[in-house]
Image (cartoon, rainbow, N blue to C red):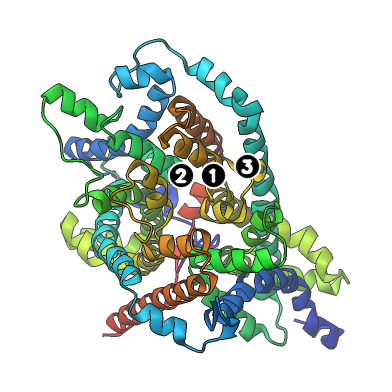
Amino acid sequence: MSPPKHPSRRRWTGWGFVGPFLVVFLFALVAPVVYAVYLSLYQNRLIGGNRFAGLANYRLALVDGQLWSGLGRVGLFLVVQVPVMLVLALGVALALDSARLYWSPLYRLGVFLPYAVPAVVAALMWGFMYGTQFGLVGDVDRVVHASLPDPFSNALVLASIGNIVTWEFVGYNMLIFYAALRVVPGELYEAAELDHASVWRVIWHIKLPALRPAVLVAVIFSIIGSFQLFNEPNILKPLSPDTISSYFTPNMYAYNLSFAGQEYNYSATVAVVMGLITMLVAYVVQRAAARNQGA
Amino acid sequence: MTVLTPAKPARPGGRWNPRRPRRSKSLTAVMTLGLIYALLPLFWLLVNASKTQASLFSTQGLWFGGHFALFDNIRATFAYDHGVFLRWFGNTLLYVVVGAGGATVLATVAGYGLAKFSFPGKRVVFAVVLGAVTVPGTALAVPTFLMFSKLGLTNTPWAIIIPSLVNPFGLYLMWIYARDAVPNELLEAARVDGAREWRAFFSIALRLLRPGMVTVLLFSVVGVWNNYFLPLIMLSQPDWYPLTVGLNQWNAQSSTVGGQAIYNLVITGSLLTVVPIVIAFLFMQRYWQSGLAAGSVKQ
């Protein structure tokens, strides 16, 4: 390799490529974060107007029952829905990779298809289907002359939302896992065949270890998704105003603080707190996975 | 991290085993249940888009019933409220073309820059952008709104387009892709020939980067087409709504006491919103499947 002719100019050429992205990045991603932190340090009082409040908003958030109830709800959602969804996705990916399926492209495409459906449409469809008016639940009720439990009841509404999110994202996670399985080196399978290893041993000792990094990525994205839960409950709210409160999830809370309550400073505080919690949990999971890997 | 890498070929023919394992009827049966779960809501949507507002309530949901009104419903969807649905459709297209298209261009150029140049401050750029991958997008929406409203950008298309342009994960994908897909020797040869860096990029690299670009573009398009939270808070006038927010407004109107119930239009509109994106995925499956299938997983 010949040394570059104009080293000084060459050194800065990279900025020309990265610069445009960075400008937009700073404006649309970094600046709002900084602005949110700034807002969260102020309070707007009837008397005295806008003034610096230090960490007062954060002290408020710490003992805010509505914020913590929402946080508890998405936490529950996280520990139940995410494992169910990822295990399903894993099962489908392993089945597709086993080459034991008839018409396997049909299954791959079919299971992936819901990912392309907008969350709004997914929530509307399922919301109508859950309904007793012209939904499937109502149909079943009429056919068997019984009444199924209402999917919008207090006890079931979170599970009903979990079902929608699972439906939307199983296919996406499946595709990530499937892509990772496809590049497992063939020699590993040849060795397993020589050892007369069973299908289950191949899955346990070859396929699952190969999937570890992909599973980690899927888990992190699912954690982020769970803490940010907004679209589905917000769209279902008109169909079920009694069981989906305005602070059902922290994101709905932040939204309603801004748009119904005009409490911009406190809304920004909630957003900052949620961002921090999400990044912290994602970081802890990543560290735990890295330590496991090392052991 | 999951990444698309072009370099490593998948197992030849996709399968290593020359003797395919015997196909299993029971496994196929179980998977069929999964397929039904995935497709049933879409089937329900199609069936119910063919019903009048009255027969939605009077016929059972999982089969066609009453007057077949799909085409009447489509006509009514486009005609309702002086054709506002068409306006929303156009808005969505605008946001997709400029937002997702711009995001892909920015991510490609910057990913290439990170992969092929060393420059002062590169490590900082890396750390900040990778950190941003885990910054939850929706947590940013409210702060972004507050900032944009100070700047007078709310209620304009820019409020949707500018945030859509930033795709840190897309940048990350393109960095990996460019690193492996564009051989340094090729660029060196171009430099020896005296080609400027940008010419080398346009004449050599861009062609090699295309499969990665298509994948990033496709996922950006889905992201923008399906975007709901951001336009919901940024826009208060229906004139700039994308389809998602418009549909939700129709639904909210139907559920309100005294509002005109137009569930048949909500359902038909939903169907019309889904169809283009599904078609895009089906037609481009060669790209995204080969992109992902040739992909490997790295840490």
Going by the image, does B95 lie left or right of A185?
right
Residue B174 seen in the figure: no
Q: Disc 1 vs disc 3: Cβ atoms closer than 8 Å?
A: no
Say the numbered circle drawn on residue B245: 1
* Residue found 35% across the figure and 59% down from its top: A186
Residue depth check, mark 2 versus mark 3: number of the one nearer the observer: 3
Residue A203 falls in image quadrant? bottom left
| Residue indicated by mark 3 | B238
Going by the image, does A198 lie left or right of B61?
left
Tell me where residue B45 appears, x and y as whole percent: 40, 29
Tell me where residue A280 appears, x and y as whole percent: 39, 79
Q: Quadrant of the C terminus of chain B?
A: bottom left
Residue B109 falls in image quadrant? bottom right
* Residue found 75% across the figure and 81% down from its top: A1
Q: Amino acid at mark 1?
A: Val
CA distance separating discs 2 and 3 = 16 Å
Check the residue under mark 2 and report the chain it is in.
Answer: A
Q: Residue furthest right?
A: B194
CA distance separating discs 2 and 1 = 8 Å
| Above or below, B292 relative to A2 | above
Residue B200 falls in image quadrant? bottom right
Going by the image, does A116 lie left or right of A191?
right
Residue depth check, mark 1 versus mark 3: number of the one nearer the observer: 3
Q: Disc 2 vs disc 1: Cβ atoms closer than 8 Å?
A: yes
Check the residue under mark 3 and report the chain it is in.
Answer: B
Identify the secondary structure beneath mark 2.
Answer: helix
* Residue found 19% across the figure and 52% down from its top: A155
CA distance separating discs 1 and 3 = 9 Å
Front-most of residues A122 and A147: A147
Q: Amino acid at mark 2?
A: Val
Front-most of residues B23 and A148: A148
| Residue indicated by mark 2 | A120
